Amino acid sequence: MKPVSLIQFLIEERRAGRINAELSLLIEVVARACKRIAVATSKGALGGVLGNAGSDNVQGEAQKKLDVISNEILLEANAWGGQLAACASEEMEDPQPIPDMYPKGNHLLLFDPLDGSSNIDVNISVGTIFSILRCPDGITEPAAEHFQQPGTEQLAAGYVVYGPATLMVLTFGHGTHEFTLDREVGSFTLSRRDIRIPEETAEFAINMSNQRHWEAPMQRYVGELLAGTEGPRAKDFNMRWVASMVADVHRIVTRGGVFFYPLDAKIKSKGGKLRLMYEANPMAFIIEQAGGAATTGRERIMELQPTGLHQRVPVFLGSRKEIELATHYHREADGAQG
Ligand SMILES: O=P(O)(O)OC[C@H]1O[C@](O)(COP(=O)(O)O)[C@@H](O)[C@@H]1O
Ligand SMILES: [Mg+2]
Ligand SMILES: [Mg+2]
């Protein structure tokens, strides 16, 4: 089969009327920026990109040098791209307007410039996650409230994994597709089209060290997985936890599985660990378009009405039947309590 580059794929999508020229160009700009981030991450200690930046972000987390470098690469690339009205990032409290000297567009871009920051210094896969929305008509200086649209309003979402290979996974709402960076030619090439995630799985991902803090329905669900063939599920389950959401989600996009970052007593006051606008919503869109499911344990993530740019939510995503069961246990427990 003749290789299909990302550019050719975007032309196909435009010809099919699934995306417009501006969105297509925006994806090209984001892809180009991620190629530069791939180079930066691959330098490691030699490039002086490891370690802390000496500053904290809006979440009160110590920023890694690569958090800051990746953020700047994405801001710089998108400032003069011409497709954006503004962008927002995990690493910035407020939305970043497009400088007046540059042409503006009708899209809003949200991103987690470097996901899996705790793994940077130990050379484990990290990534970039992004979500694209339409800027409301007539808004020239978008504020946080203009970004706060439900996940169902996303025009596109994607992530890039910087691992042994650099991969981009993308959806426009017409299936989920994977592109591999061909380092020799320097471009992303289609490696899997219309990905389907198996409905059933025997592989789960969760940070088990938080177990004692979980809610009862989560204790029950994971307890049954761990009981395996000796328990009510009558099947053994294997566990994985990379602690880079992009890598854990990419494993699921590749071979199925489930990923959980549930609410627990430690993070209850924050509403969860992962961020709705630039982690949960884009991943939910990608997973749903590949036949999987994504909930908070109670509600469909993409139907949530956002209340803040950096809002956190519980995340349950992956193989549909398992996510439905875990969600059912939570709703049932709420019902019993209701
Ligand atoms: O350290 P924990 O509790 O295992 O959490 C890991 C989770 O935190 C994250 O690193 C948060 O994302 P950032 O690295 O972008 O802040 C996720 O990628 C990952 O799933
Ligand atoms: Mg992240
Ligand atoms: Mg991050």
Image (cartoon, helix red, strand yellow):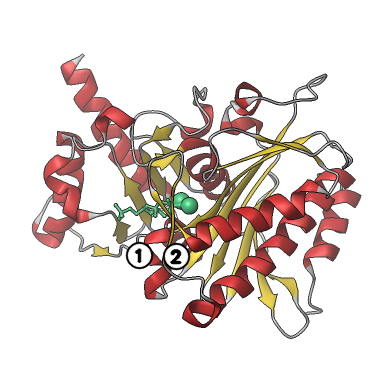
Answer left or right for 55 relative to 331.
right
Of residue 258 and residue 306, the one placed in the foreground of this image is 306
| Alpha-carbon span between mark 2 and mark 1 | 10 Å
Residues under numbered marks 2 and 1 in contact, where contact means CB atoms less than 8 Å apart? yes
Callout 1: SS: loop
The residue located at (20%, 63%) in the rendering is: 236
- 142 to the left or right of 253: right
Res. 286 visible in picture:
yes
- Asked if the beta carbon under badge 2 is closer than 8 A to the nearest atom of ligand 1, the reply is no
Q: Which mark is residue 251?
A: 2
Above or below, 279 against 250 in this view is above
How far across and how far down the image is residue 335, in percent?
Answer: 23, 19
Residue farthest to the top, as pictured: 338
Question: In the image, what residue occupies the spot 53% across and 35% down?
Answer: 93
Looking at the rendered structure, the kind of residue marked 1 is: Val
User: x, y percentage for residue 235?
Assistant: 20, 60
The part of the image, by quadrant, that contains residue 135 is: top right
The local crowd at label 1, few if under 14, some if 14 to 19, many if 20 or more residues have their Cα within 10 Å, is some
Say which residue label 1 marks. Answer: 242
Q: Picture coordinates of residue 178 (x, y %)? A: 64, 64
Which callout, 2 or 1, points at the residue further toward the start of the chain?
1
Q: Residue at x 67, y 54 (%)?
A: 74
